[in-house]
Image (cartoon, rainbow, N blue to C red):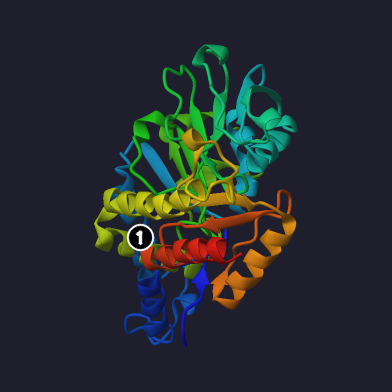
Amino acid sequence: MSRALNFNAGPAALPEAALKQAQSELLNFRGTGMSVMELSHRSKDYEAVHNAAIASLRSLLSISDDYEVLFLQGGASLQFSMVPMNLLQAGQTAYYALTGAWSEKALKEAKKVGKTEIVSSSKDNQYKNIPALDPAMVANNAAYLHITSNNTIYGTQWHKFPTGLQVPLVADMSSDILCKPLNMDQFDLIYAGAQKNLGPSGVTVVIIKKDLLTRSSDDLPTMLNYNTHVKNNSLYNTPPTFGIYLLSLVLEWIEEQGGVQAIEKINEQKAKLLYDEIDESNGFYSGHATPDSRSTMNVTFTLQSEEATKSFLSQAKEAGFVGLAGHRSVGGCRASIYNAVPLENVERLAQFMREFRKNY
């Protein structure tokens, strides 16, 4: 069976090596006679998987002991509520930078919890760029500043994160975590749904600075309090054990590639292939994002007409490409080139774009 040329935005491509290892262990995980899905989450066999995944993530991102690493459920969408519920205290304001649909949704949920303010936005520019953000516009007594590091729908990405802040920086990194090295000291809370760059759907990673945990009120619902999961090593209730196991295999694969630094170089190479085709097409392809804000994870573009777009997508499907249609809210085309998308697949897409343009 030939593997699809998978450019889905999420759930997205997983490393073939990780899938093959999971396949080989599916019925008999490390001599237990059971699948990981059948193990008790209280067993030593599963606990070893769980703790190894946490250790791998700490190593890859150089996460110090000042932070807790959690595996939660509910996706980034639940974090839109949990972040303000735990961090936004009475009399404070939470600041949000609007860079796309997901930051809008995060703001919408925060408004239900407490006072919010938009500190910067590129909505008037159809979210084509990451807006300038002046740290002086964030009050020193603010609860936090929230950003969305990468925007899957519009194809934009923060390349330089806000500095000079006097308040905690919170980042939704669902679609670009582990695509490049991070200075963890810049962030106080990072959350990420796994289904784009970390593993399968069903797992959400939260990395939170320990000193923020004092803000969580005991009056919060038990499952929505970060302290509940910290005290129980993310094992308060049954976690998505198979998802965490697969996530651990993805992290092992990243380590085998040479770590995040090596992954970053490949990601830059993949993105350049597609952006070069767009830029050298004399307007046949038009990128949505401004060059200074282009994402290395989601390349969004349009063609000269709706007819050309339909023909492009139709022929791409016949050629074996999957997931190239743009988000339903904006249309056009989108190639999601997360860590696990092989370089050779992107090379084939770039060649297809070149040939389609010449033959259309």
Nearest the eye: 118 or 347: 347
Residue at left 63%, top 18%?
92
Mark 1 residue crowding within 10 angstroms, few (<14) / some (14–19) / many (20+): many
Residue at left 35%, top 52%?
269
Total labels drawn = 1
Nearest the eye: 276 or 144: 276
Nearest the eye: 102 or 341: 341
Residue at left 57%, top 58%?
9
Residue 4 locus on image (x, y percent): 51, 76
Task: Report if residue 287 is visible in the image.
Answer: yes
Question: Which corner quadrant holds the C terminus?
Answer: bottom right
The reply, left or right, for residue 39 in relation to residue 48 is right
Q: Residue tagged by mark 1?
A: 251
Task: Report if residue 213 is visible in the image.
Answer: no
The reply, left or right, for residue 320 in relation to residue 332 is left
**Local SS, label 1:** helix
Residue 343: name its quadrant.
bottom left
- Three-letter residue code for mark 1: Leu
